[in-house]
Image: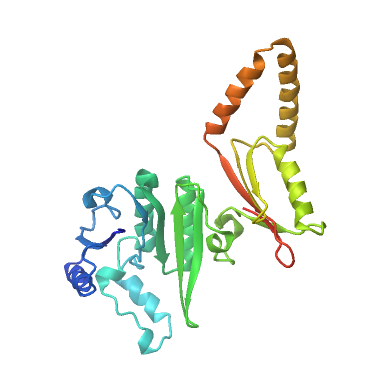
Protein backbone atom coordinates (compact mmCIF):
# COMPACT_ATOMS: atom_id res chain seq x y z
CA UNK A 1 0.00 0.00 0.00
CA UNK A 2 1.28 3.46 -0.85
CA UNK A 3 1.78 5.90 2.02
CA UNK A 4 2.08 9.69 2.10
CA UNK A 5 3.83 12.00 4.56
CA UNK A 6 2.48 15.49 5.34
CA UNK A 7 4.88 18.01 6.88
CA UNK A 8 4.13 21.32 8.60
CA UNK A 9 5.95 23.64 11.02
CA UNK A 10 2.73 25.07 12.47
CA UNK A 11 1.06 23.12 15.26
CA UNK A 12 -2.45 24.38 14.49
CA UNK A 13 -2.19 23.47 10.81
CA UNK A 14 -0.88 20.03 11.75
CA UNK A 15 -3.79 19.48 14.13
CA UNK A 16 -6.27 20.20 11.35
CA UNK A 17 -4.33 17.85 9.09
CA UNK A 18 -4.61 15.06 11.66
CA UNK A 19 -8.36 15.64 11.96
CA UNK A 20 -8.73 15.41 8.20
CA UNK A 21 -6.76 12.14 8.16
CA UNK A 22 -9.03 10.62 10.81
CA UNK A 23 -12.25 11.95 9.25
CA UNK A 24 -11.32 10.39 5.90
CA UNK A 25 -10.07 7.07 7.38
CA UNK A 26 -6.57 7.59 5.97
CA UNK A 27 -4.60 6.81 9.13
CA UNK A 28 -2.87 3.84 7.51
CA UNK A 29 -1.85 5.88 4.47
CA UNK A 30 -1.08 9.43 5.59
CA UNK A 31 1.46 10.34 8.25
CA UNK A 32 1.49 13.98 9.48
CA UNK A 33 4.82 15.14 10.93
CA UNK A 34 5.65 18.39 12.70
CA UNK A 35 9.00 19.86 11.78
CA UNK A 36 10.99 22.96 12.73
CA UNK A 37 11.96 25.74 10.30
CA UNK A 38 15.60 24.61 10.26
CA UNK A 39 14.81 20.90 9.87
CA UNK A 40 15.27 19.22 6.47
CA UNK A 41 12.45 19.96 4.06
CA UNK A 42 12.52 16.36 2.85
CA UNK A 43 13.23 14.37 6.06
CA UNK A 44 13.20 10.83 4.70
CA UNK A 45 15.43 9.53 7.47
CA UNK A 46 13.25 11.07 10.18
CA UNK A 47 10.23 9.40 8.56
CA UNK A 48 12.03 6.08 8.28
CA UNK A 49 11.48 6.06 4.52
CA UNK A 50 14.15 4.88 2.11
CA UNK A 51 12.66 6.39 -1.05
CA UNK A 52 9.54 8.10 -2.39
CA UNK A 53 8.07 8.71 -5.82
CA UNK A 54 7.68 12.49 -5.63
CA UNK A 55 7.34 15.55 -3.43
CA UNK A 56 4.65 18.25 -3.65
CA UNK A 57 5.37 21.70 -2.28
CA UNK A 58 3.45 24.99 -2.10
CA UNK A 59 6.17 27.20 -0.60
CA UNK A 60 5.78 30.56 1.15
CA UNK A 61 5.90 33.06 -1.72
CA UNK A 62 7.16 36.17 0.06
CA UNK A 63 10.41 37.21 1.74
CA UNK A 64 8.74 39.52 4.33
CA UNK A 65 5.39 40.90 5.47
CA UNK A 66 6.06 44.13 3.57
CA UNK A 67 6.79 42.12 0.43
CA UNK A 68 3.40 40.43 0.82
CA UNK A 69 1.58 43.75 1.36
CA UNK A 70 3.36 45.43 -1.56
CA UNK A 71 2.37 42.56 -3.86
CA UNK A 72 -1.26 42.77 -2.75
CA UNK A 73 -1.35 46.54 -3.21
CA UNK A 74 -0.29 46.21 -6.84
CA UNK A 75 -3.27 44.01 -7.66
CA UNK A 76 -6.89 44.92 -8.16
CA UNK A 77 -8.80 41.87 -7.00
CA UNK A 78 -12.35 41.19 -5.85
CA UNK A 79 -12.74 40.11 -2.20
CA UNK A 80 -13.30 36.44 -3.04
CA UNK A 81 -9.78 36.11 -4.41
CA UNK A 82 -7.98 37.85 -1.56
CA UNK A 83 -5.21 35.92 0.18
CA UNK A 84 -6.41 34.19 3.37
CA UNK A 85 -3.13 32.47 4.27
CA UNK A 86 -1.48 33.08 7.62
CA UNK A 87 1.90 34.81 7.67
CA UNK A 88 3.66 31.58 8.63
CA UNK A 89 2.27 30.07 5.40
CA UNK A 90 3.07 33.05 3.18
CA UNK A 91 6.42 34.43 4.39
CA UNK A 92 9.87 32.89 4.67
CA UNK A 93 13.40 34.32 4.66
CA UNK A 94 14.46 34.83 1.06
CA UNK A 95 11.00 34.07 -0.31
CA UNK A 96 10.04 31.15 -2.50
CA UNK A 97 13.31 31.08 -4.43
CA UNK A 98 15.33 30.60 -1.24
CA UNK A 99 12.87 27.94 -0.04
CA UNK A 100 13.01 25.92 -3.27
CA UNK A 101 16.79 26.38 -3.40
CA UNK A 102 16.92 24.55 -0.05
CA UNK A 103 14.95 21.75 -1.69
CA UNK A 104 17.42 21.65 -4.57
CA UNK A 105 20.37 21.47 -2.16
CA UNK A 106 18.74 18.61 -0.26
CA UNK A 107 17.93 16.83 -3.51
CA UNK A 108 21.62 16.98 -4.42
CA UNK A 109 22.24 14.78 -1.38
CA UNK A 110 19.17 12.55 -1.61
CA UNK A 111 19.51 12.11 -5.38
CA UNK A 112 17.35 9.20 -6.56
CA UNK A 113 15.81 8.51 -3.17
CA UNK A 114 13.11 10.81 -4.58
CA UNK A 115 12.14 10.11 -8.18
CA UNK A 116 10.72 13.60 -8.83
CA UNK A 117 10.98 16.77 -6.77
CA UNK A 118 8.24 19.32 -7.49
CA UNK A 119 7.20 22.74 -6.26
CA UNK A 120 4.69 25.41 -7.17
CA UNK A 121 5.85 29.01 -7.56
CA UNK A 122 3.84 32.19 -7.12
CA UNK A 123 5.97 34.47 -9.29
CA UNK A 124 6.94 33.94 -12.92
CA UNK A 125 10.28 35.62 -12.25
CA UNK A 126 11.09 32.86 -9.75
CA UNK A 127 10.93 30.19 -12.45
CA UNK A 128 14.09 31.37 -14.20
CA UNK A 129 15.96 31.75 -10.90
CA UNK A 130 15.05 28.22 -9.82
CA UNK A 131 16.03 26.73 -13.19
CA UNK A 132 19.40 28.48 -13.04
CA UNK A 133 19.90 26.94 -9.59
CA UNK A 134 19.10 23.50 -11.04
CA UNK A 135 21.55 23.97 -13.90
CA UNK A 136 24.24 25.15 -11.47
CA UNK A 137 23.76 21.94 -9.48
CA UNK A 138 24.11 19.84 -12.63
CA UNK A 139 20.46 18.84 -12.98
CA UNK A 140 19.77 18.06 -16.63
CA UNK A 141 16.27 16.67 -16.28
CA UNK A 142 13.59 19.18 -15.33
CA UNK A 143 10.07 20.23 -16.31
CA UNK A 144 8.09 23.47 -16.13
CA UNK A 145 4.38 24.18 -16.38
CA UNK A 146 1.78 26.86 -15.80
CA UNK A 147 -1.42 26.61 -13.75
CA UNK A 148 -4.25 28.88 -14.88
CA UNK A 149 -7.28 29.42 -12.67
CA UNK A 150 -9.98 31.56 -14.23
CA UNK A 151 -8.77 34.62 -16.12
CA UNK A 152 -6.57 36.29 -13.49
CA UNK A 153 -4.84 33.77 -11.23
CA UNK A 154 -1.71 32.08 -12.51
CA UNK A 155 0.86 29.94 -10.77
CA UNK A 156 3.86 28.05 -12.11
CA UNK A 157 5.36 24.67 -11.40
CA UNK A 158 8.91 23.33 -11.56
CA UNK A 159 9.91 19.67 -11.26
CA UNK A 160 13.30 18.01 -11.46
CA UNK A 161 14.81 14.56 -11.25
CA UNK A 162 18.27 13.05 -10.93
CA UNK A 163 17.06 10.04 -12.91
CA UNK A 164 17.08 9.38 -16.65
CA UNK A 165 13.35 9.00 -17.33
CA UNK A 166 11.96 12.15 -18.93
CA UNK A 167 8.35 13.33 -19.24
CA UNK A 168 6.70 13.90 -22.61
CA UNK A 169 7.78 17.13 -24.22
CA UNK A 170 4.33 18.73 -23.95
CA UNK A 171 4.51 18.11 -20.20
CA UNK A 172 8.14 19.08 -19.61
CA UNK A 173 7.99 22.27 -21.71
CA UNK A 174 4.66 23.57 -20.43
CA UNK A 175 5.60 27.29 -20.31
CA UNK A 176 5.98 28.10 -23.98
CA UNK A 177 6.90 31.75 -23.53
CA UNK A 178 10.02 30.99 -21.46
CA UNK A 179 13.37 31.66 -23.15
CA UNK A 180 14.60 28.51 -24.87
CA UNK A 181 17.66 28.16 -22.65
CA UNK A 182 15.36 27.77 -19.64
CA UNK A 183 13.30 24.98 -21.21
CA UNK A 184 14.48 21.38 -20.85
CA UNK A 185 16.14 19.73 -23.82
CA UNK A 186 13.44 18.52 -26.28
CA UNK A 187 13.14 14.77 -25.87
CA UNK A 188 11.09 14.05 -29.00
CA UNK A 189 10.69 15.12 -32.60
CA UNK A 190 7.91 14.72 -35.16
CA UNK A 191 8.42 14.65 -38.92
CA UNK A 192 6.78 13.42 -42.12
CA UNK A 193 8.22 11.07 -44.75
CA UNK A 194 7.34 10.51 -48.40
CA UNK A 195 6.80 6.71 -48.25
CA UNK A 196 3.17 5.70 -48.62
CA UNK A 197 2.93 2.70 -46.27
CA UNK A 198 3.95 1.91 -42.70
CA UNK A 199 5.67 -1.30 -43.89
CA UNK A 200 7.91 0.66 -46.24
CA UNK A 201 8.88 3.14 -43.54
CA UNK A 202 9.42 0.34 -41.03
CA UNK A 203 11.77 -1.47 -43.40
CA UNK A 204 13.89 1.67 -43.88
CA UNK A 205 13.91 2.36 -40.13
CA UNK A 206 14.95 -1.20 -39.30
CA UNK A 207 17.71 -1.24 -41.92
CA UNK A 208 19.08 2.08 -40.67
CA UNK A 209 18.95 1.36 -36.95
CA UNK A 210 20.27 -2.19 -37.28
CA UNK A 211 23.33 -0.81 -39.06
CA UNK A 212 24.23 1.04 -35.85
CA UNK A 213 25.85 -0.41 -32.74
CA UNK A 214 22.65 -0.45 -30.67
CA UNK A 215 20.25 -2.88 -29.04
CA UNK A 216 17.08 -2.61 -31.11
CA UNK A 217 13.71 -4.33 -31.16
CA UNK A 218 10.87 -3.43 -33.49
CA UNK A 219 7.30 -4.60 -32.86
CA UNK A 220 5.32 -4.48 -36.13
CA UNK A 221 2.01 -5.07 -34.32
CA UNK A 222 2.18 -1.58 -32.82
CA UNK A 223 4.59 -0.03 -35.36
CA UNK A 224 7.01 0.87 -32.58
CA UNK A 225 10.68 0.19 -32.00
CA UNK A 226 12.77 0.51 -28.84
CA UNK A 227 16.53 0.95 -28.84
CA UNK A 228 19.46 1.47 -26.45
CA UNK A 229 23.00 2.68 -27.07
CA UNK A 230 26.07 2.85 -24.85
CA UNK A 231 27.40 5.97 -26.59
CA UNK A 232 27.03 8.16 -29.67
CA UNK A 233 26.86 5.64 -32.52
CA UNK A 234 24.90 7.65 -35.10
CA UNK A 235 27.23 10.52 -36.03
CA UNK A 236 29.39 10.34 -39.14
CA UNK A 237 32.59 9.99 -37.11
CA UNK A 238 31.06 7.16 -35.05
CA UNK A 239 30.03 5.29 -38.20
CA UNK A 240 33.51 5.72 -39.71
CA UNK A 241 35.04 4.42 -36.48
CA UNK A 242 32.76 1.38 -36.55
CA UNK A 243 33.67 0.69 -40.18
CA UNK A 244 37.37 0.91 -39.32
CA UNK A 245 36.96 -1.40 -36.34
CA UNK A 246 34.99 -3.84 -38.48
CA UNK A 247 37.77 -3.98 -41.04
CA UNK A 248 40.34 -4.52 -38.29
CA UNK A 249 38.21 -7.27 -36.73
CA UNK A 250 37.91 -9.10 -40.05
CA UNK A 251 41.68 -9.00 -40.45
CA UNK A 252 42.20 -10.35 -36.91
CA UNK A 253 39.65 -13.15 -37.40
CA UNK A 254 41.38 -14.26 -40.59
CA UNK A 255 44.68 -14.48 -38.68
CA UNK A 256 43.34 -15.98 -35.40
CA UNK A 257 40.67 -18.75 -35.63
CA UNK A 258 39.90 -18.39 -31.90
CA UNK A 259 39.06 -14.69 -32.22
CA UNK A 260 35.44 -15.45 -33.18
CA UNK A 261 34.80 -17.04 -29.78
CA UNK A 262 36.37 -14.03 -28.06
CA UNK A 263 34.16 -11.64 -30.03
CA UNK A 264 31.03 -13.61 -29.03
CA UNK A 265 32.03 -13.32 -25.35
CA UNK A 266 32.66 -9.58 -25.78
CA UNK A 267 29.26 -9.15 -27.43
CA UNK A 268 27.52 -10.81 -24.47
CA UNK A 269 29.33 -8.48 -22.07
CA UNK A 270 28.33 -5.44 -24.15
CA UNK A 271 24.65 -6.38 -23.97
CA UNK A 272 24.85 -6.44 -20.16
CA UNK A 273 26.70 -3.11 -19.95
CA UNK A 274 24.87 -0.01 -18.71
CA UNK A 275 23.19 1.88 -21.52
CA UNK A 276 23.66 5.64 -21.86
CA UNK A 277 20.83 6.47 -24.23
CA UNK A 278 17.39 5.01 -24.83
CA UNK A 279 15.02 5.92 -27.65
CA UNK A 280 11.64 4.94 -29.08
CA UNK A 281 10.47 5.31 -32.66
CA UNK A 282 6.74 5.25 -33.40
CA UNK A 283 5.41 5.14 -36.95
CA UNK A 284 1.93 6.46 -37.59
CA UNK A 285 -0.05 6.82 -40.81
CA UNK A 286 -2.42 9.63 -41.78
CA UNK A 287 -2.43 12.84 -39.78
CA UNK A 288 -0.16 11.39 -37.12
CA UNK A 289 3.49 12.11 -37.91
CA UNK A 290 6.44 9.83 -37.16
CA UNK A 291 7.87 10.54 -33.74
CA UNK A 292 11.10 9.80 -31.96
CA UNK A 293 11.50 9.95 -28.18
Total marks placed: 0
- The image quadrant that residue 175 belongs to is bottom right
Q: Position of residue 51 (x, y in %)?
A: 33, 49
Give the quadrant of residue 155.
bottom left
Vertical arrangement, residue 120 with respect to residue 238, above or below: below
Is 214 above or below relative to 205? Answer: above
Residue 126 visible in rendering: no
**Rendering coords of residue 150 (x, y %):** 47, 82
For the point 79% across and 52% down, the residue is 200
| Residue 20 percent location from the top left of the image | 22, 73
Relative depth, front residue between 63 and 238: 238
| Residue at (74% x, 66% y) in the render | 286
Q: Which quadrant does the N terminus fall into?
A: bottom left
Can residue 158 be seen in the rendering of this structure?
yes
Lateral position of residue 71 relative to residue 238, left or right: left
- Measured along the vertical axis of the image, is residue 15 above or below residue 212? below
In the picture provided, is 189 more to the left or to the right than 93? right
Of the pair 223 and 282, the residue shown nearer to us: 223
Q: Which residue sits furthest front?
A: 221
Q: Position of residue 134 (x, y in %)?
A: 46, 51
- In the rendered view, how is the structure colored? rainbow
What residue do we see at 57% from left, 29% from top? Answer: 270
Identified at 51% across, 48% down, the residue is 140
Q: Would residue 85 be found to the left or right of residue 16 on screen? A: right
Query: Foreground: 254 or 64?
Result: 254
Residue 116, image quadrant:
bottom left
Q: Is residue 246 left or right of residue 165?
A: right
Of residues 144 and 114, the one nearer the viewer is: 114
Amino acid sequence: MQADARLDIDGKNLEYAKRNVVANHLGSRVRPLKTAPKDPLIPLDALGIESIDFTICNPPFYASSSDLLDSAAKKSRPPYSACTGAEIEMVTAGGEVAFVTRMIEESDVLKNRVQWYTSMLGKLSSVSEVIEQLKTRGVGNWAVTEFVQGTRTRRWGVAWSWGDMRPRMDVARGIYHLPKHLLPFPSEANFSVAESTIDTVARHVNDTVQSLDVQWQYRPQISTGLGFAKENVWSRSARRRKQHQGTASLTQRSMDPKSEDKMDESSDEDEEAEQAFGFKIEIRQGQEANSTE
